Amino acid sequence: MKNIFIEGPINPAFVAESITKHTVKTAIGGHSIFLGQIREDLIDDKKVEAIDFTTYHEMALEKAGEIREDIITKYELTCAHIYHSLGKIKVGEICLFVFTSAPHRKEAIRACDEMVDRIKKEVPLWGKEIWEDNTHTWKENK
């Protein structure tokens, strides 16, 4: 089972390297990339400074693997990749990187969109929102 977790934020250079590695796969006609970034939410006059992500590792890897295989089969993808941050990720930093590739763009785009939705709904990941006053609340995915 491939590890999808990265300690800390996802570096934009890592995203660029991932794209570069795919230039040798000449059956690919389109890629779709989703980058999830920590948003500076404002609730009750308090700003979010970071989100601290934790997971149930074994179950999360199993579920992410299932989602990945389902999506690859459904959309006949050439490949698909999921990376998610763990630990404290600050506002403006990237915490989720989903990358799908297919012979045609529409399949890559639809696959990426569905994969992100399923990750947010099905993978056991929790985000503790850290506020500017050092209080926190547990984030709920909408």
Image (cartoon, rainbow, N blue to C red):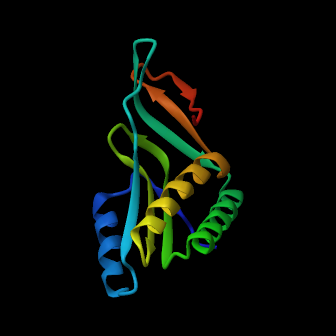
Residue 42 falls in image quadrant: top left
At a point 42% along the width and 74% down the height, the residue shown is: 104
| 9 sits left or right of 85 in the view | left
Residue 10 falls in image quadrant: bottom left
Quadrant (top left, top right, bottom left, bottom right) of the C terminus: top right
The reply to whether residue 5 is visible in this rendering is no
| 104 sits left or right of 126 in the view | left
Q: Is residue 26 above or below residue 5?
A: below
Task: Give 109 or 64, whichever is nearer the viewer.
Answer: 109
At a point 29% along the width and 58% down the height, the residue shown is: 12
| 91 sits left or right of 84 in the view | left
Q: Position of residue 30 (x, y in %)?
A: 37, 72
The reply to whether residue 50 is visible in this rendering is yes
Task: Give 86 or 65, whichever is nearer the viewer.
Answer: 65
Q: Position of residue 135 (x, y in %)?
A: 50, 21
Q: Position of residue 141 (x, y in %)?
A: 58, 36
Q: Position of residue 133 (x, y in %)?
A: 42, 19
Farthest-out residue, top:
44
